Amino acid sequence: MRGRAAGSRIGRCLVRGFSLLEMLLVVVLIAATGLLAAGVLTGGLDRLQLKSSAQEIASQLRFTRAHAIATGSPQSFSIDPAAHTWRAAEERSGEVPERLGITFTGAREVQAREAEGVIVFFGDGASTGGRVRLSFRNAAWNVDVAWLTGEVRLHRAEPAP
């Protein structure tokens, strides 16, 4: 019996685990490697910024539509491709990075200025419709708004020639 107790102590002394600091270091290294790999595989940070900007515009269009339905009154979303800025309902506004190209296609009747694109959402959810295209080099994303339903869709697109 005495031999077993001595052997157990020795066995416990030989077994060594990892400290919390070592585990955190490994997690950080894996995360950093993953980010670098994602940057290389997807075309870099510029493409990630392109997608993020398109998602932000789609989100703000959806918010503007929801606000129009909630209030029962028309709400507008406008984008100025030259200034790289947008405005949504409830005085929300933002900027699009300068290196991204912006193209707007929509109804001219609701545009306050020729260079500015406007999409109006009505209280029933319908809209004037339109498309915001963001592009960078050979990548592009379209944010489409259906005129009849006001549905906002985001999808990858071929860049303009």
Image (spheres, helix red, strand yellow):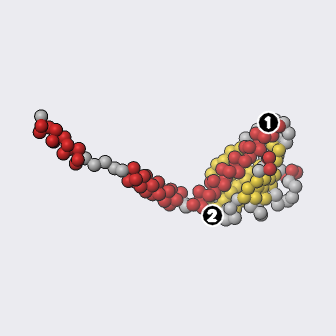
Dot label at residue 149: none
**Residue topped by disc 2:** 137
Above or below, comparing residue 127 to residue 30 in the picture: above
Q: Image point 62% across, 51% down: which residue? A: 156
**Viewer-proximal residue, 80 or 10?**
10
Q: Looking at this rendering, what residue extends furthest in the front direction?
A: 2
Question: How many numbered dots are placed on residues in this image?
Answer: 2
One can see residue 41 in this view: no
Helix, strand or loop under label 2? loop
- Mark 2 residue crowding within 10 angstroms, few (<14) / some (14–19) / many (20+): few
Horizontal and vertical percent for residue 96? 70, 59
Q: Image point 66% across, 47% down: which residue? A: 154
Q: Image point 28% across, 49% down: which residue? A: 16
Horizontal and vertical percent for residue 79? 78, 55
Horizontal and vertical percent for residue 127? 80, 42
Above or below, comparing residue 15 to residue 137 in the picture: above
Does 108 sit left or right of 101 as displayed? right
Q: Quarter of the image for the C terminus: give it.
A: bottom right
Horizontal and vertical percent for residue 63? 74, 43
User: What's the CA distance linking mark 1 and mark 2?
Assistant: 39 Å
Q: Kindly identify the amino acid type of the residue bearing the numbered disc 1.
A: Ala
Q: Quarter of the image for the N terminus: give it.
A: top left
Does 13 sit left or right of 35 as displayed? left
**Residue topped by disc 1:** 70
Q: Are marks 1 and 2 in contact (CB under 8 Å)?
A: no
Q: Kindly identify the amino acid type of the residue bearing the numbered disc 2.
A: Arg
